[in-house]
């Protein structure tokens, strides 16, 4: 079995794609992200970072979602299979 590299959503470069591996959030924010489609296996594309670097726009299940770095850092991604 190969070693799979996991990294935070904040580390995904513009134009990069990966799949959600885990959410390390709890409470309302976890539920909001799940409602937006950020669940295990979902493909995420980093579209654009704001001029100041925060927030960042991501393509998630056909919708463009802007997330702050504090929240995006709690989303763990794995490389696309």
Image: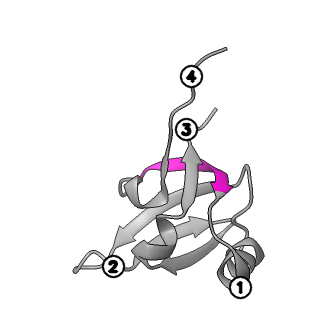
Sequence-wise, the earlier of marks 3 and 4 is: 4
Tally of marks: 4
Residues under labels 2 and 1: Cα distance?
A: 21 Å
Give percent across and percent down for residue 68: 44, 79
| Above or below for 15 versus 58 | above
Mark 4 — residue? Answer: 3
Residues under labels 4 and 2: Cα distance?
A: 31 Å
SS class, disc 2 = loop
Tell me which secondary structure the magenta stretch mostly adopts: strand
Residue pictured at 66% horizontal, 54% vertical: 22
Report whether 26 appears left or right of 6. right
Q: Cβ–Cβ below 8 Å for labels 3 and 2? A: no
Sequence-wise, the earlier of marks 4 and 2 is: 4
Q: Nearer the viewer, residue 80 or 30?
A: 30
Sequence-wise, the earlier of marks 3 and 1 is: 1
| Above or below for 19 versus 2 | below
Marks 4 and 2: which is nearer the front?
Answer: 4
Residue pictured at 62% horizontal, 62% vertical: 24
Report whether 31 appears left or right of 79. right
- Number of residues whose C-alpha sits closer than 10 Å to that of mark 2, classed few (under 14), some (14–19) or many (20 or more): some
Residues under labels 3 and 2: Cα distance?
A: 23 Å
Q: Which mark is residue 54?
A: 2
Give, as a single range, the part of the protein colored magenta. 15-22
Give percent across and percent down for residue 50: 30, 79
SS class, disc 4 = loop
Mark 3 — residue? Answer: 79
- Number of residues whose C-alpha sits closer than 10 Å to that of mark 3, classed few (under 14), some (14–19) or many (20 or more): some
């Amino acid at each position: 079995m190969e070693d799979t590299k996991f990294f935070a959503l904040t580390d995904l470069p513009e134009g990069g794609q990966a799949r959600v591996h885990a959410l390390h959030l709890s409470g309302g924010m976890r539920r909001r992200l799940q409602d937006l489609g950020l669940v295990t296996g979902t493909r995420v594309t980093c579209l654009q970072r704001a001029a100041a670097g925060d927030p960042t726009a991501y393509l998630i299940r056909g919708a463009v979602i802007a997330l702050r770095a504090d929240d995006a850092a709690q989303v763990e991604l794995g490389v696309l299979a």
